[in-house]
Image (spheres, grey):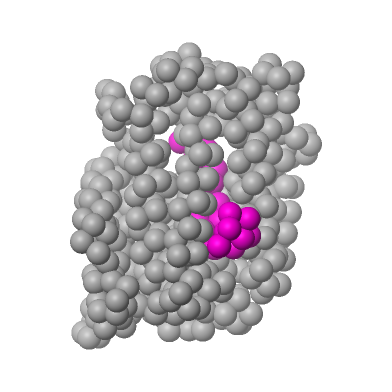
Amino acid sequence: MGLVDRLRSVGPAALVAAAFVGPGTVTTASVIGAEFAYLLVWTIVFSILATMVLQEMSARLGLITQQGLGEALREQFDNRIVSALAVALVVTAIGVGTAAFQTGNITGGAAGLTTITGVGERLWGPVIGLVAGALLFTGNYKLIERVFIGLVVVMGLAFVVNAIAVRPDVGDLAVGLVPTVPEGSALLIAGLIGTTVVGYNLFLHASTVQEKWSEPEDLEEVQYDTIVLVAVGGLITTAIVITAAAVFPEGTSIDDVGEMADQLEPVMGGFALTFFAIGLFAAGFTSAMSAPLAGAYATAGALGWERDLESTRFRAIWMTILGIGIVFSGLGFNPVEVILLAQVANGLLLPILAVFLLYAMNNETLLGEHTNSPIQNLLGVAVTLVAVMIGVLTLNDNLPAFIDAVRSLAGL
């Protein structure tokens, strides 16, 4: 297959790349660049390699078994109690998590449009949500995939143009590829890895790969798709870090991407701000589509429901997730407590999913000759250990606030 044909064959991994390069990643990458310049670029490289490892396994599982990760998880356990607990964990962590983050996705995209148009975020938020819902409601996977690919290209061009325009120091950038952990950077490192290696993307990828491919002979194309588009996501994240490192003095503490946008205004006669806003919109809009879709695939699969884009129950799941984001964004509501619960839940869920995925990928009954090789198992174990570390750091850092949030939501 030639290069042109390979590029034409890319698809499902675009949803994965768009999902992890959302407003949360834009914010985290901006903060890292402003505070530590290029010193943590190595974190992006590690995150992307870890994402490739897990997403390739998930995509291979989906292609070979023609099952989603939710079905595979439910059917791997003979004990009904264990199976029920696994299903409950997935539905709670993925369903609630994607719903909680959906507000941030929509408001992030709205912030980008507000910067461009001057129209308030409370208006753009519901508009973004309704347009995303209309696209998902078509049930046309090819159309949805093309929209994702197009927006990933737009997002990439917008952020990469800015990174080039600020003229980064190539020497310092190369130094940043050497792993170091500056004082006070541990939680930011965990945060960036945690926003890149995302649990619900494993469900999304295992299911969407079946929309495009169905034969074991397609595995090479699936792997190419995964590597190329996840790498593109990493390039976008790196571009954001580079831009922030160039426009802020090292050690600057910023609270949100709005401060970065202000610093970009003098660059390129103001065009840099527009490019950044376009990139932020694309990041928010694609995440506003991918999160409900991932939540629907994960929940439907875990519950044994039909994973069909035109299925009533499937639509009901993503419409609920999307609806929460639309309502909260329209009200200007920031569900900090719910998002906190979702962050902790997802941080704890990822290592559990990684362990299960490794277990499933070594099941010859399930995968036959397509089980993991020793090297793939070694890489998978390494990524799983890092996921455990992230979960521990997330829980330790947020435990007091987590307890307060639970009490608040419980009305105590």
Q: Nearer the viewer, residue 301 or 409?
A: 301
Whether residue 103 is visible, yes or no, is no
Q: Which image quarter is the N terminus in? A: bottom right
Which residue corresponds to the image point at 22% horizontal and 86% vertical from the top-left? Answer: 78
Is 378 left, or right, of 12 in this rendering?
A: left
- By secondary structure, the bulk of the magenta-drawn segment is best described as helix
Placement of 338 over or under 139, stated as above or below: above
Which residue is painted at 23% across and 51% down in the image? Answer: 382
Query: Which residue is depicted at the point 36% across and 47% down?
Result: 49
Count how many numbered circles sit on residues in the image: 0
Q: Between residue 348 and residue 377, name the one nearer to us.
A: 377
Which corner quadrant holds the C terminus? bottom left
Is residue 168 in view from this perspective? yes
Q: Tell me where residue 57 appears, x and y as whole percent.
A: 36, 64
Residue 96 screen position, x and y as percent = 45, 62
* Lateral position of residue 55 relative to residue 130, left or right: left
Tell which residue pokes out farthest to the front in this image: 2
> Horizontal and vertical percent for residue 7?
60, 56
Judged left or right of residue 365, residue 250 is right
Q: Is residue 358 above or below residue 174?
A: below
The boundaries of the magenta stretch are 1-28
Residue 346 within the magenta-colored segment of the rendering: no
Residue 116 found in image quarter: top right
Point 56% across, 74% down: residue? 211
Residue 343 appears at what percent x and percent y?
Answer: 38, 51
Q: Is residue 23 magenta?
A: yes
